[in-house]
Structure formats: structure tokens, C-alpha cells
Image (cartoon, rainbow, N blue to C red):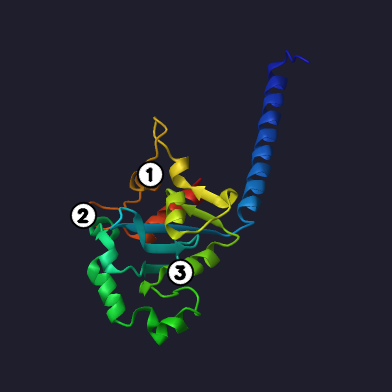
Amino acid sequence: HQCDDPLLATCFSEEEEEEEERRKKTLTRRRTKAATTKAAVAIDCERVRGRDGAELLAKVCVVDDLGAVLFQAVIDLPASSVADFRSEVSGVTRADLLLGRGGGGTNNKNSSSSSSSGLNFFSSKVVPLGAAQERVRRLLKEKIVVGHDLTKDLVALGIRHPRIDMRDTALFFRDDQKKKRKLRDVALAELGLRIQRPGVPHDPREDADAAMRLYLKH
């Protein structure tokens, strides 16, 4: 049916706009419900280079959707197995490992009691890889997992997670050539957030929080 009355045509247009607005609101509610079905956590890892050239997990941090730390640790690596600590990026030094072991490390009784307290499990002490894997695996179970270049972090952790529950911001934010953008560039452009400053080691908590903010924004 064609309407020749411009006023009536305007009325039809307004009705269409209202219908479109209702459709958008409905879609938003559905997306919100779907997004809140599962809780979300974000992870970030730092790696060092081993004697055999392989990348070894050195630091891990898991945060919730508010940026609160659920778990963070330096991984217990024999210093002799590390060829390059990449301290300028990882923030891990030989002294960190030696201090962690010398201070009682994971054999300290207080460490085992703190592990049952929940949020600050092992805090930032030196932790055996197996213990870190188990803790992170429990935190990630049945949750949406967010990260930047997430697959690399999960590989470093030796943890599998359902692909349908993975949200990799490195895949979502690409440049004009479809290449992955650095987290620091995306965080600045999308959030106005400055991270990974030159000359300062990366902070896994800060990076995980930035990835989570990007996920929540989009």
C-alpha cells in the first residue's frame, strides 16, 4: 500500500522507528541475559625463555569482572632452566625465584592455610606449576574466560577450555590489515587506559583487567 499523504507517511515512519526501538531493547535484554548466564573472569600470563628455546610460564593472574584479583602467582622455575628472564617485560628476575624459595616458598605452613581462604590464594608467592594450574582450572571452570591472545596463555598454563566460552580480545580488535593489535594500543584507543608503559615490566593484573574492560564494553 502506498501512502500519498505526507503526514500519514510521517506517522508510519514514527511507528516503524518505535518498532525498531522495541526490537533493539528486546535484543539487548536477551544479550544481557545470555551474558550473565555465566560469570566471566580474565587471565593474563607472562613468560620467560627456557634453555631449550621454549616459552615457560612465569607469572599468572586471574581477575573477576570488577578487576579484583582472584589469584596471582610467580611460577616456581629452577633458575638454571631459564635462558632469558625477559625481566624488562615479565618483571621476573632470578632474585624473585631465589627469594621465594628462601622465604619458605610453597612449603610455608601459612601458604597452605591461605590457599583455603579463597581470593588471595598463594598471593604473589612462588608457586609450583601444578598448584597454579589446579587453582586456575577451578577458577575458570564453567565461566567465560577473557584474555588478549588468550590461546597463548592457556597453552602456557597447560589448560584446555571450551572454545565457546573463550573471549579473545586480540581476535576482536584488529587493524585494517586484519592483524592483531597490541593490548596497550587497544586499551588506549577504546578505554583511554594507559598500560604497558615503556621501560616498565608488564603487570598481569593490569593487563587482565584491561582485557575484561574491553570485553564488558563490547
Instruction: Residue under label 1, please give it.
Output: 186
Three-letter code, disc 3: Gly
Answer left or right for 24 relative to 168. right
Q: In this view, does 175 lie above or below 118?
A: above
Answer left or right for 160 relative to 33. left
Distance from label 1 to label 2 (Cα)? 19 Å
Three-letter code, disc 2: Gly
Q: Reading the chain from its start, which is encountered first: label 3 or label 2?
A: 3
Q: Outermost residue, right direction?
A: 1
Image quadrant in which you'd find residue 45: bottom left
- SS for callout 1: helix
Residue 6 position within the rendered picture, expressed as x and y whole percent measured from the top left? 68, 17
Three-letter code, disc 1: Val
- SS for callout 2: loop
Residue 199 position within the rendered picture, expressed as x and y whole percent measured from the top left? 21, 54
User: Relative to the observer, which residue lies in front, 178 or 127?
Assistant: 127
Q: In this view, does 120 lie above or below 151?
A: below
- SS for callout 3: helix
Residue in the picture at 38% in, 79% down: 106
Q: Which of marks 3 and 2 is in front?
A: 3
Q: Nearer the viewer, mark 1 or mark 2?
A: 2
Query: Where residue 199 is drawn, which disc sits there?
Result: 2
Residue in the picture at 45% in, 63% down: 62
Residue 102 position within the rendered picture, expressed as x and y whole percent measured from the top left? 27, 80
Whether residues under marks 3 and 2 lie with C-beta atoms below 8 angstroms apart, the answer is no
Q: Outermost residue, bottom direction?
A: 109
Instruction: Residue under label 3, please give it.
Output: 130
Q: Outermost residue, front direction?
A: 52
Answer left or right for 71 relative to 2. left
Q: Residues within 10 Å of mark 2 (few under 14, many from 20)?
A: few
Q: Which of marks 3 and 1 is in front?
A: 3
